[in-house]
């Protein structure tokens, strides 16, 4: 995959945007459980009072609270609360919220910054606890003695009926602070969370004293928190859609670019590269493999990047909620990963095996279908069924095994996750009892745990599908990085005008890359304009190879090929091929119409030219016999015309081009002898001054050629006319006598 | 998104000429069965053998679901107990948190989960066994069916289609059975169970939750409809792109020869760009499903949190209930979408199953006669009596073919392509049955023999060289598994392929690869000849048996064949007339009829159709 990374470069901006959006999405997703926990903790448990920082105090209360506040902190408290008297002009604004304001002055919280709220919470929380404790003392003197122990101040000695706070106020501040310090020690041991939870209860009482509607407060709190959650979840949704948008554009865009480059690259391939990859594999590489890569890019941007963000974010938040329970998640994740890894260690080799077995089954089926006639002729139906059954059995056994492994995995995974929930509740309850966390925190922790586990599951998916995609990516990169063996020269020469078309082979040898032996060796000949040069020899003698060297489908390994005295490697490939009308062994047509196929050679050709070409190629009859004529459809691969018709049409196509050089690579093999000879007769009349090269197996086809070159095992073993060769060339004699009767050999 | 597996054939045809947008759009029909009910019934009949297993699967699936549904509610009680304990201790009353109660609840829930897991595991275990077994049976039935089908069927059905039935369709049935059957049950039980649990917690919250779920359904339907549109478009353009790639790569040499690179790339870019615009939209829209579901899910979550908090204050529900309810809502959407999908899956199953059943119910070869003729001493007297035949009933190819072939004669069938030469062979081997008239072997109608016995009489070498994925040795031995290695080598020598085989890296043990591309066409023909030689049959049929062998080798084989054919009735079809010059009788065919017959010299002298055919091979240049 790394080799294709450059295709993502143009999409850097959308990718960065997606990653940013993914961060937002993950945070939104992770924020929700936190808000739920607030609803439970603050909304339900604390009746909507968040902390000790009350929105208002009675003047008396706050004044008394200040008795328990360290002098250093007093400034902060004083700055945060403002005293309002009933006759204050601003009182009207507040009187509705705090009905008590009508009767007496109250302190109202000023909008301070959030940072100080936490500080203030602790200061006021402790003061509130001290205040309420002393209040209780006043009612229950027996408890007061406890407080006196070891101190200089003994509340129990306060005369009855005297307000304890007045006494405190009258005390020297040093003595008072001694008391406060002792209280402070007691409270600190409770922990911040507990202080808040307890102080909240006192604040609630204060609110009632202020005449506030406590129920309303609670409802408001829940609605406010809920509203925030709603906004967050909508934000999460919007970002997800955004990510999806950018990810799909990136993936499809990169796929488009890759596909285009692969296609262009392959179109520039020469036969050597085609041989290396095989056509089928090249097709897969530029279609399925690209689609695979597209899917991966999309998945990658959507999930693979997202999972770690979610996982790490979840861990941070979970630890934040309860640092002491993180090990539960760790254990669960390790267990899950162990399970997944074990299962895949077992299953993955089986997956591969299964693919092989499927291929095997398909192969046997295909063979059964394609060999049906032979199978029945040899009465082998039962054996074939047996063979199929073996393949079927093997496949069934393996796929059952794999299915059962998977069947085991899902429930066990669910069980693990459920066990995690149970463990969190059990451990969490103890944490709650120790006041380390609140119930809502535990509930949030559970959800974080699930999110973390999900993130890990997502990441483990990565290990399943990434290797497969990597294979596709490598296959594509292999194509893109292939060096093309045949290149245009840097400083191309031009053919001389007028172009004659004389082809000269000078000691040409050719060897396929990595082959041990030459296919063609030391071939020399000259093919002149206006003449027909024919190549004959048994299969594998290299005759097709020889003529494939002319249009530079391959380059010679030794010697050179000259056309009008210029080496074919010194001109542009397009200039060279412009001069050649090439008819391949297999009639190859493109989808479209007969006309579009003929015009492929020369888009400007007029109707007469087409007609003439079809006439020569002996194709007019069947073309114009059909109603649509030239407009007849040709399906992809020309499957709707017969082999002979295909050959004749591809011959006609070459004729439309009217090139100075014709190359027929065994192009008459699918024609019956009658058509073959008629075609050659017509052609001879019309090709005139063109150089014609014909490769064939048929002696009849070459008999009248101006020059026959006999090849055997890549070497020229005879050169001359039919008559000359009959006298001088043994190989030719053998070929000829195998095809012709004695009287015809003359 | 698995409903789009089959690419419509029209989508693969690239439009000709300049790109035509919105031209005759391929009619993309969903993959649906024509006879849903009937197919389902057949499928259930097929499932009949597994009744007990399926029943167990159902019971366990239901039990597993119920147990897992009960979990959250019970677990919620633990949270509630915890919460109440905390509240009490805050208020300064009570004994704090009741850990005994919590522990007990957790143990109970753990037990439930364990049981649910176990049941679900057992259910899956049995079901996977059943579905793989059914798959196995389906495949086996199809494979055996293939061997009983008349050739006629395969004239109209491509190999790919049959192959697709045995792989794709059977797989689809397997997968859907494996998943949908248990999924259907669990989803249904889940929905009902969850609904019940939700109602027991709070009917108000349930009603609120129920208004949200249809909302998600609605959105999903809208999105799916849009994405379907683009998906179809994407598939169509993908078809264009792939079609163009296949075509151009397949015709690479011609494209090169005519300097067609630029044109081809331009055309490709056009397809590629349109593909891009539909591809990203399709992917975007189908990628929206999940987030939308999640947003709606979160919406539910929020509403439940608010409402639950509100109700909790009033004391109508407990904190644990909120927790349980949230879990229920979360687990509600999945079975709902699954149920919504089930009709789709069933349709798919039915469509796939229908194709399988259709194939299994195709007409088979006419069975052999009850009291077949016992062939003992085969003389080789073959008579065609006014044979009439056509592959299609309305297209008669062989009109009135009669010929009486004496034992030991070497008969050649010649004529232009399409004259019906190969058809005659197929009739003789009873790959097809004649429409009218009769073919007699040793004076018995071939229909009165068992097919097996009839085919045993002939050794056949076809133009289409079929070899299979095994060693060369086994391929030659194909028709006579009891032949010794020595006999195989002997046959190979006779077919002049022994030397070639010995030059291969593994010799006779070379395994022919899947495409049998590791040896040349000519060599393949030689192997098939060896395969026929080893059979030592009473009669021989050679249909273009040496067409790909070079002529020098052919002469050598010819000699070997002549020894083999001595005193045996043999039929030879050949393009190269040189190979049949020494036939005892040449039947010249044109358009399904015998137009001339006789020996080579006689026919030449007659200067008719045969002479023309023959001379065209050597036609000399017209002077001028």
Image: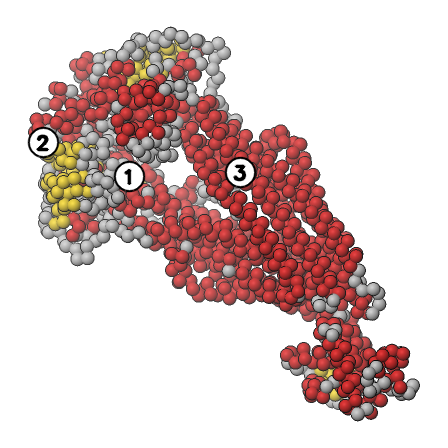
Upstream in the sequence, badge 3 or badge 2? 3
Image depth: mark 3 or mark 2 in front: 3
Q: Residue furthest front?
A: A150
The residue pinned by badge 3 equals: A399
Name the residue located 41 percent from the left edge and 25 percent from the top edge.
Answer: A372
Secondary structure beneath disc 3? helix
Q: Are marks 3 and 2 on the same chain?
A: yes
**Of A214 and B178, the residue lying toward us:** B178
Q: Are marks 2 and 1 on the same chain?
A: yes
Determine the image quadrant of residue A557: top left
**Of A675 and B2, the residue lying toward us:** B2
Q: Residue furthest right?
A: A160
Q: Is residue A532 left or right of residue B150?
A: left
**Of B65 and B387, the residue lying toward us:** B65
Q: Chain of mark 2?
A: A
Q: Chain of mark 3?
A: A
Residue B136: give x, y in percent of width and height.
54, 32
Mark 3 closeness class: few <14, some 14–19, many ≥20 residues within 10 Å: many
Name the residue located 11 percent from the left edge and 43 percent from the top edge.
Answer: A506
The residue pinned by badge 1 equals: A588
Q: Is residue B56 left or right of residue B513?
A: right
Secondary structure beneath disc 1? loop
Q: Are marks 3 and 1 on the same chain?
A: yes
Q: Quadrant of the C terminus of chain A?
A: top left
Residue A573: give x, y in percent of width and height.
20, 50
The residue pinned by badge 2 equals: A721
Residue B115: give x, y in percent of width and height.
70, 45
Name the residue located 20 percent from the left edge and 40 percent from the top edge.
Answer: A518
Distance between the alpha carbons at the discs numbered 2 and 1: 31 Å
Secondary structure beneath disc 2? loop
Q: Is residue B530 left or right of residue A39?
A: left
């Amino acid at each position: 995959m790394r080799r294709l990374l450059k295709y993502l470069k143009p999409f850097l901006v959308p990718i960065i945007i997606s990653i940013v959006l993914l961060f937002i999405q993950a945070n939104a997703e992770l924020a929700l459980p936190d808000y739920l926990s607030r609803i439970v903790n603050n909304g339900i448990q604390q009746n909507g009072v968040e902390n000790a920082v009350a929105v208002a105090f009675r003047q008396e209360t706050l004044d008394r609270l200040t008795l328990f506040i360290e002098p250093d902190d007093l400034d902060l408290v004083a700055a945060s609360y403002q005293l309002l008297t009933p006759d204050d002009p601003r009182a009207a604004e507040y009187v509705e919220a705090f009905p008590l304001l009508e009767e007496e002055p109250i302190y109202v919280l000023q909008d301070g910054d959030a940072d100080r709220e936490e500080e203030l919470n602790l200061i006021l929380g402790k003061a509130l606890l001290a205040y309420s404790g002393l209040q209780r003392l006043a009612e229950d003197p027996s408890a007061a003695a406890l407080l006196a122990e070891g101190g200089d101040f003994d509340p129990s000695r306060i005369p009855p009926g005297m307000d304890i706070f007045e006494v405190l106020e009258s005390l020297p501040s040093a003595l008072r602070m001694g008391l406060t310090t002792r209280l402070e020690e007691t409270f600190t041991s409770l922990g911040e969370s507990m202080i808040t939870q307890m102080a909240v209860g006192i604040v609630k009482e204060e609110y009632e004293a202020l005449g506030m509607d406590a129920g309303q407060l609670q409802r408001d709190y829940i609605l406010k928190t809920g509203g925030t959650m709603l906004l967050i979840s909508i934000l999460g949704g919007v970002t997800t859609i955004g990510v999806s948008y950018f990810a799909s554009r990136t993936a499809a865009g990169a796929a488009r670019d890759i596909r285009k480059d692969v296609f262009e690259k392959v179109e520039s391939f020469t036969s050597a590269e085609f041989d290396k990859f095989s056509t089928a594999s090249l097709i897969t590489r530029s279609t399925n493999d690209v689609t695979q890569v597209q899917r991966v890019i999309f998945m990658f941007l959507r999930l693979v990047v997202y999972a770690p963000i979610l996982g790490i974010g979840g861990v941070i938040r979970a630890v934040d909620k309860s640092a002491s329970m993180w090990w539960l998640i760790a254990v669960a994740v390790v267990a899950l990963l162990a399970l997944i890894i074990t299962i895949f260690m077992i299953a993955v080799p089986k997956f591969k095996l299964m693919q092989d077995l499927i291929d095997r089954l398909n192969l046997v089926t295909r063979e059964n279908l394609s060999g049906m006639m032979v199978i029945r002729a040899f009465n082998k139906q039962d054996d074939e069924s047996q063979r199929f059954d073996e393949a079927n059995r093997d496949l069934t056994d393996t796929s059952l095994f794999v299915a059962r492994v998977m069947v085991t995995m899902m429930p066990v995974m669910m069980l693990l996750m459920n066990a995690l929930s149970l463990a969190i509740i059990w451990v969490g309850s103890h944490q709650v009892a120790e006041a380390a966390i609140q119930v809502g925190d535990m509930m949030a922790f559970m959800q974080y745990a699930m999110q973390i586990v999900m993130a890990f599951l997502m990441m483990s998916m990565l290990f399943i599908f990434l290797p497969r995609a990597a294979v596709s990516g490598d296959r594509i990169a292999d194509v893109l990085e292939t060096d093309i063996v045949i290149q245009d020269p840097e400083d191309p020469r031009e053919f001389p005008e007028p172009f004659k078309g004389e082809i000269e082979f000078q000691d040409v040898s050719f060897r396929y890359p990595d082959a041990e032996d030459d296919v063609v060796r030391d071939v020399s000949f000259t093919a002149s304009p206006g003449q027909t040069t024919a190549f004959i020899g048994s299969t594998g003698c290299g005759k097709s190879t020889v003529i494939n060297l002319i249009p530079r489908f391959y380059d010679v390994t030794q010697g050179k090929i000259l056309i009008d005295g210029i080496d074919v490697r010194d001109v542009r490939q397009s200039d060279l091929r412009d001069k050649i009308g090439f008819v391949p062994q297999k009639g190859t047509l493109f989808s479209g119409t007969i006309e579009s196929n003929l015009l492929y050679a020369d888009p400007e050709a007029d109707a007469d030219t087409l007609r003439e070409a079809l006439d020569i190629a002996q194709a007019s009859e069947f073309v114009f016999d059909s109603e649509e004529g030239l407009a007849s459809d040709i399906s992809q691969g020309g499957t709707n015309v017969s082999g002979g018709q295909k050959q004749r049409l591809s011959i006609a196509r070459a004729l439309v081009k009217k090139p100075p050089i014709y190359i027929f690579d065994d192009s008459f093999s699918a024609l019956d002898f009658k058509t073959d000879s008629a075609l050659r007769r017509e052609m001879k009349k019309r090709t005139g001054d063109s150089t014609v090269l014909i490769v064939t197996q048929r002696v009849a086809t070459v008999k009248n050629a101006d020059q026959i070159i006999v090849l055997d095992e890549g070497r020229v073993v005879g050169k001359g006319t039919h008559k000359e060769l009959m006298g001088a060339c043994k190989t030719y004699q053998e070929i000829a006598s195998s095809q012709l009767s004695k009287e015809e050999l003359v | 998104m698995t409903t789009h597996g089959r690419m419509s054939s029209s989508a693969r045809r690239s439009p000709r000429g300049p790109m035509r947008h919105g031209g005759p759009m391929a009619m993309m029909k969903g993959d649906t069965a024509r006879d849903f009910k009937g197919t389902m019934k057949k499928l259930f009949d097929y499932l009949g053998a597994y009744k007990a297993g399926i029943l167990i699967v159902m019971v366990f699936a239901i039990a597993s679901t119920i147990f897992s549904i009960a979990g959250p509610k019970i677990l919620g009680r633990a949270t509630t107990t915890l919460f109440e304990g905390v509240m009490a201790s805050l208020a300064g009353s009570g004994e704090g948190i009741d850990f005994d109660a919590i522990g007990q609840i957790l143990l109970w829930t753990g037990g439930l989960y364990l049981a649910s897991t176990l049941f679900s595991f057992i259910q899956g275990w049995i079901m996977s066994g059943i579905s793989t077994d059914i798959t196995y049976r389906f495949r086996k039935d199809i494979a055996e069916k293939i061997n009983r089908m008349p050739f006629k069927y395969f004239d109209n059905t491509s190999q790919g289609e049959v192959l697709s039935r045995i792989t794709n369709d059977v797989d689809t049935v397997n997968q859907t059975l494996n998943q949908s059957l248990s999924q259907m049950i669990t989803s249904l039980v889940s929905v009902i169970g969850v609904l019940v649990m939700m109602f027991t917690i709070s009917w108000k919250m349930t009603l609120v939750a129920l208004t949200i779920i249809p909302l998600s359904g609605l959105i999903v339907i809208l999105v799916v409809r849009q994405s379907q549109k683009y998906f179809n478009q994407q598939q169509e353009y993908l078809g264009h792109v792939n079609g163009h790639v296949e075509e151009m790569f397949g015709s690479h040499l011609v494209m090169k020869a005519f300097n067609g690179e630029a044109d081809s790339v331009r055309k490709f870019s056009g397809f590629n760009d349109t593909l891009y615009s539909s591809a990203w939209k399709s992917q975007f829209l189908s990628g929206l499903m999940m987030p939308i579901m999640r947003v709606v899910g979160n919406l539910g979550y929020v509403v439940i949190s608010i409402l639950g908090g509100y109700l909790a204050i009033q004391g109508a529900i407990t904190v644990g209930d909120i927790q349980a309810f949230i879990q229920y809502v979360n687990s509600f959407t999945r079975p709902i979408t699954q149920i919504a999908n089930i009709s789709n899956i069933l349709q798919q199953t039915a469509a796939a199953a229908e194709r399988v059943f259709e194939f299994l119910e195709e007409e088979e070869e006419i069975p052999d006669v009850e009291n077949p003729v016992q062939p003992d001493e085969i003389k080789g007297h073959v008579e065609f009596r006014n044979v009439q035949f056509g592959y299609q009933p309305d297209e008669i190819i062989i009109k009135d073919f009669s010929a009486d072939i004496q034992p030991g004669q070497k008969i050649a069938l010649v004529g232009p392509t399409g004259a019906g030469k190969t058809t005659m062979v197929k009739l003789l081997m009873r790959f097809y049955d004649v429409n009218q008239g009769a073919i007699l072997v040793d004076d018995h109608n071939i229909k009165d023999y068992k097919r097996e016995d009839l085919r045993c009489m002939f050794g056949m070498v076809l133009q289409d060289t079929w070899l299979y994925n095994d060693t060369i040795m086994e391929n030659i031995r194909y028709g006579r598994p009891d032949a010794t290695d020595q006999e195989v080598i002997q046959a190979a020598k006779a077919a002049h392929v022994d030397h070639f085989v010995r030059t291969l890296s593994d010799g006779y043990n070379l395994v022919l690869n899947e495409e049998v591309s590791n040896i040349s066409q000519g060599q393949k023909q030689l192997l098939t000849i060896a395969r026929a030689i080893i059979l030592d049959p009473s009669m021989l049929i050679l249909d273009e048996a040496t067409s790909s062998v070079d002529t020098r080798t052919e002469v050598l084989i010819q000699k070997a064949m002549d020894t083999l054919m001595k005193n045996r009735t043999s039929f030879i079809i050949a393009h190269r007339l040189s190979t049949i010059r020494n036939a005892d009788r040449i039947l010249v065919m044109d358009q399904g009829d015998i137009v001339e017959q006789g020996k080579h010299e006689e026919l030449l002298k007659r200067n008719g159709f045969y002479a023309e055919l023959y001379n065209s091979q050597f036609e000399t240049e017209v002077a001028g």
